[in-house]
Amino acid sequence: MTTLTRQDLNFGQVIADILCEFLEVAIHLILYVREVYPSGIFQKRKKYNVPVQMSCHPELNQYIQDTLHCVKPLIEKNDAEKVVVVIMDKEHHPVERFVFEISQPPLLSISSETLLSHVEQLLRAFILKISVCDAILNNNPPGCSFTVLVHTRDAATRNMEKVQVIKDFPWIVADEQEVHMQEPRLIPLKTMTSDIVKMQLYVEERAQKT
Amino acid sequence: MEDVVLHHQSGSADGLRSLLERTEKLLETFPCRPPPVFMPWFPSAAAGPRRQIRPAKPAPVITSAESPPEKTQRSEEAVCVSETPKLLLPPPLRHRAEGAISPQKHKDGAFRASPLERSWSAAMPRGVPPQKSLSQLFDRVVSAHRLHLRQRAKWVIREHNCGAAQDIEQVWRTLSRSVRRAGMPTCNANIQRDRAEIWVFCDVLYSEQVGRLLKAELQLTGTIVLSVHRQGNVFSM
């Protein structure tokens, strides 16, 4: 086993690539499973060797891509603690929050478990959990929308230019109303631990959705 | 726990003893491993709202009335891409659209949904009962061009058809309402903002009726043209 720092082999970039690719798949699947968008805009695809649903609507796809394009540098520099997919009701109050907590070790140990195939196996388990999570969540009210919140470390938010890598895609600090959820129910979905990244996913669900 | 009755064939005492032991073992409580306590790694309480950021632009709203655009883009009618803000169009389209109308930036720096390059609406199979009879003149046109009655035809509304009292956007809004409440049989329509045209598609069978409805409901002036794929303009009204 070899130990490397984050700068070696530009591991931060590799991790950011892997995680952003995963988050893209996960966001599409969450939007499908939680019926934020009509099911007609989704198509079945295969990722991590499991069937997933991906939107084929160019506006939505572009929005998700732009969002993740801005999140990527934060993950790369280990400045993102959480990426949260927030589903909001018509009044823009959160009803569900899919929280991806990301933790990257300061020192990276290279072993057989670092292999991409192994990491992809772990990510596949997340996808499978998301695809069945509707069984344990209550139905959302009609007319829901979504946003992506990124919990950053202080240093990252002080320098917002870091996030605003796309000119026409500005980022703002989230309002308390968009963040705070009354009496949330916490539902753990999946935790993974690998040499290069640790991640866990849980859902915070509002007790009274209607 | 309820009583368990063991039925066995009488035999040796050893056999009975081992049978009892085995049964007692089977009835022991199944060992359960308590699951590890789940704890968020970064509790939200510790993080103030100051540290949580989101895109200023809201996610697109897609209603179930819209069909998946990429699926239909290849067909003739698929120029009907749904409400696409120019900011979200791919770069070549975006540049073309920007030539027409620039995106609106608000005081807070956020870009709001800008005017759209193309929009579409489609009729549901209900509403106004369609008339299946053709006028003699249109019947001759159908015969001359050997058109199939279920073939799609396209009415083109240009800016000069809108008259002085209204512009093409107002006509489009009226038309969308009419198409959505199924006032026009077999119709779907889209606005081509870069051409300043509205295209209304319908079956050849109903195109005369649709043409009359368009002229009456939208108060169009001048002549509107009916065109058919490959044949070009075949009729005007």
Image (spheres, helix red, strand yellow):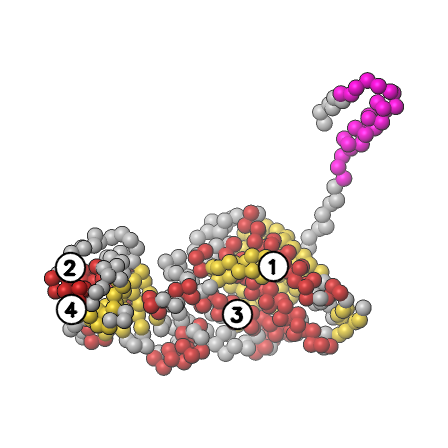
* Quadrant in which the N terminus of chain B is drawn: top right
Which element is circle 4 on? loop
Horizontal and vertical percent position of residue A193: 71, 60
* Quadrant in which the C terminus of chain B is drawn: bottom left
Return the residue at label 1. A49
- The chain under label 1 reads A
Q: Residues within 10 Å of mark 1 (few under 14, many from 20)?
A: few
In the rendered structure, which amino acid carries the disc numbered 2?
A: Leu
* In this picture, residue A75 sits left or right of residue B221: right
Residue range of the region highlighted in magenta in the rendering? B7-31
> What is the tally of numbered marks visible in this picture?
4
Q: Are marks 2 and 3 in contact (CB under 8 Å)?
A: no
Q: CA distance from mark 2 to mark 1?
A: 56 Å
Return the residue at label 4. B237
Q: CA distance from mark 2 to mark 3?
A: 51 Å
Q: Residue at the spot x=71%, y=25% of the render? A: B2
Of the two numbered discs 4 and 2 on the same chain, state the one appearing first in sequence. 2
Horizontal and vertical percent position of residue B137: 12, 65
